Image: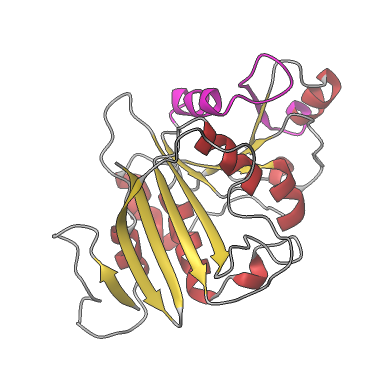
Amino acid sequence: MRRLFPVTDQTPARSQDGADREWSLDELADAYAYPALAADGRWLRANMVSTLDGAAQHEGRSQPISGETDMRIFGTLRALADVVVVGAETVRQEGYRPARAREAFAARREAAGQGPAPAIAVVTASMDLDFSLPLFTSPLVPTLVVTGAAAPSDRVAEAEAAGAEVVVAGEGAAVDAARAVRELAARGLRRQLTEGGPRLLGQFVAADVLDELCLTISPTLTAGAAQRIAGGPSVTVPHRLAPACVLEEAGFLFTSYRRI
């Protein structure tokens, strides 16, 4: 893996021995470390993958356009987060399971005051989820279900009976994206990571609460009508981000952009 653009002057530009080789998990964790947060601060980053022609999925899933190193970075970003925020459709399409504790990151998480694994927070207005799945019944950290105040009461009760914590972040059925970020931060989940899907990411962009985008550019072409990484209504003024890091391996570009 080669670094094409440094994160900071203090971050090594190459692997520690100077060779183009697979980076260790510690090196990846250093490269993707969250910035220092104020006592009342929070940081929302997104992790997405896109083909060269702009597709965020192939046949409804992101896995076919991903790769081995992309999945290592995916795991690293999860291991750094307090909470992984994901839309209900992505949970259904990708077969989400609970986040797991990873020994390689245990000391780092303990030093940061984090639990053994991030919580998963599922954003849903309809509550159309299978609460018998392991994501809800047997997570290491209780799964959160983020919904609106007008969500179906029977489904709310079913979620709570399965062991999930229901977080209200909207006055109607829909979830207010900015309020969802605030509600999670208020629970101490301040290092936030969203893995989409495109509709949820579009809501975060529209609400102007996204602080960082980690985007893998896959060296593939798919054509077709697949979604982009962010969907929904256009913003009035495009949001400008600044490059923080670009890595390359096997034709994949692993980029990070942060708000200016």
Q: Is residue 99 left or right of residue 188?
A: right
The N terminus sits in image quarter:
bottom left
Of the pair 259 and 181, the residue shown nearer to us: 259
Residue 110 appearing in the image: yes
Q: Is residue 168 left or right of residue 44?
A: right
x, y percentage for residue 56? 62, 60
Q: Residue at x 43, y 50 (%)?
A: 213
Q: Residue at x 33, y 28 (%)?
A: 41
Q: Quadrant of residue 168?
A: top right
Question: Which range of residues does the magenta coloring cover?
Answer: 160-188
Q: Residue at x 57, y 38 (%)?
A: 234
Q: How is the image coloured?
A: secondary structure
Q: Residue furthest front?
A: 236
Indicate whether 157 appears above or below 196.
above
Residue 80 among those drawn in magenta = no
Indicate whether 13 appears above or below 160.
below
Of the pair 130 and 65, the residue shown nearer to us: 65
